[in-house]
Image (cartoon, rainbow, N blue to C red):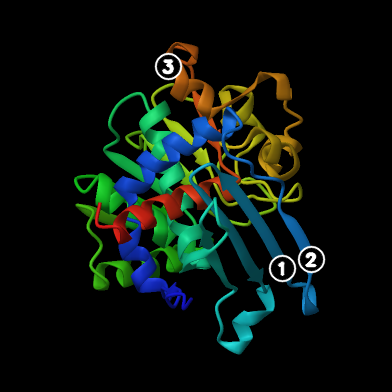
């Protein structure tokens, strides 16, 4: 019996299959499924490559779908003029094991990571945000700006880089590429405007890039620090905030912000608990939401892609 050729989607096609609005809804479902063990998502396997590179193997299975993300992260690619991350996400029939389709790995990672931040905003923000601060000018900043443009097009977005010139260049480039937010501005002053509702840190820094006094009306989201040696959100902000994560198991090994602040993990909640019971959210308390990612979120993205491919 001849099997149909497996569809393989490049970065642009993958992005079209997984719009942020649909991803947020899929991540909400997947967060609850994962917490209730309806999705199996073991800790990622890390295998070394040359020159400090790593290969990441991240499978996840659910009754309706199975996926395997295999990506290579090679920081030494910059001088070669190559992207840092290469790889694919394969989706499989959960009954037969047959390959259904293959998505671009970096695109899935970037978009589902940004969508998890958007789910954090939907879940934890005190009100619909009007002003954002993105700290970082890399690929994840681009992904988050796209997500904000899709879901909060009337927002003002400030961007802070490691130097003012980097933030200015980022904003100029994104305006050329058709950013959908109402206003996009570099933050060149050291201070953070009081009007900012949501701060999203998107760097690989090893020292805090945000350490303001915690404020109930400002949600702080940490994305970039994904090893114990990295830290973006400072201990001052963390100490004054209620703490939540996307993946409680993974965060204990990867959330450098929380690890270096020596948090009491018994006081750190998962986003799934709030999604299942909004009453578990502490009233009028500043919140820091830390996401580290897991293969369950890639499975959520593949659910969205499958729905799009089926014409649903």
Q: Earlier in the sequence, mark 3 or mark 1?
A: 1
Within 10 Å of disc 2 (Cα), the crowding (few <14, some 14-19, many 20+) is few
Residue for badge 1: 55
| Marks 3 and 1 in Cβ contact (< 8 Å) | no
State the image coordinates of residue 274 (x, y, percent, origin top left): 48, 21
Q: Is residue 216 above or below residue 218?
A: above
What residue is drawn where x is 58% and y is 29%?
35
Q: 276 left or right of 57? A: left
Report the residue at 44% width, 68% height from top: 165
> Where residue 307 sits: x, y (%)?
33, 53
Residue 186 visible in the snapshot: no
Q: Position of residue 248 (x, y in %)?
A: 65, 33
Closer to the chain start, of discs 3 and 2, is 2
In this view, the residue in front, 48 or 256, is: 48
Q: Which residue is painted at 30% across and 46% down in the image? A: 21
Q: Which residue is farthest bottom?
A: 80
Give how far apart the Cα atoms at labels 2 and 1 are.
5 Å
Q: Is residue 248 visible?
A: yes
Q: Which residue is mark 3?
A: 278
Distance CA(mark 3)–CA(mark 2): 39 Å
Query: Upstream in the sequence, badge 2 or badge 1?
Result: 2
Q: Which residue is mark 2?
A: 47
Q: Residues within 10 Å of mark 3 (few under 14, many from 20)?
A: few
């Amino acid at each position: 019996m001849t099997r149909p050729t497996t569809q393989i989607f490049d970065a642009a096609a993958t992005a079209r299959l997984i719009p942020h609005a649909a991803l947020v809804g899929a991540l909400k479902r997947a967060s609850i499924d994962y917490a209730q063990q309806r999705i199996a998502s073991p800790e990622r396997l890390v295998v070394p490559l040359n020159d400090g590179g790593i290969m990441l193997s991240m499978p996840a299975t659910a009754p309706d779908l199975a996926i395997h993300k295999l990506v290579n992260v090679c920081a030494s690619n910059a001088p070669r003029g190559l992207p840092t991350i290469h790889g694919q996400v394969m989706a499989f029939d959960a009954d037969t094991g047959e390959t259904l389709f293959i998505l671009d790995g970096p695109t899935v990672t970037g978009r589902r990571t940004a969508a998890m931040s958007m789910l954090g905003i939907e879940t934890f923000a005190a009100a619909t945000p009007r002003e954002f601060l993105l700290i970082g000018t890399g690929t994840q900043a681009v992904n988050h700006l796209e997500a904000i443009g899709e879901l909060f097009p009337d927002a003002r977005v400030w961007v802070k880089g490691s130097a003012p010139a980097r933030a200015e260049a980022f904003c100029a480039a994104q305006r050329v590429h058709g950013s959908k937010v109402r206003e996009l501005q570099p933050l060149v002053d050291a201070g953070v405007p009081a009007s900012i509702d949501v701060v999203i840190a998107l760097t690989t820094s090893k020292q805090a890039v945000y350490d303001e006094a915690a404020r109930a009306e400002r949600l702080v989201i940490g994305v970039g620090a994904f090893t114990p040696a990295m830290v973006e959100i400072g201990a001052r902000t963390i100490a004054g905030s209620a703490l939540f994560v996307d993946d409680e198991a993974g965060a204990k090994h990867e959330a450098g912000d929380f690890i270096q602040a020596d948090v009491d993990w018994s006081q750190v909640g998962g986003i799934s608990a709030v999604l299942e019971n909004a009453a578990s959210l502490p009233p009028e308390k500043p919140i820091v939401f830390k996401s580290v990612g897991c293969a369950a979120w890639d499975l959520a993205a593949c659910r969205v892609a499958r729905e799009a491919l089926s014409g649903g």
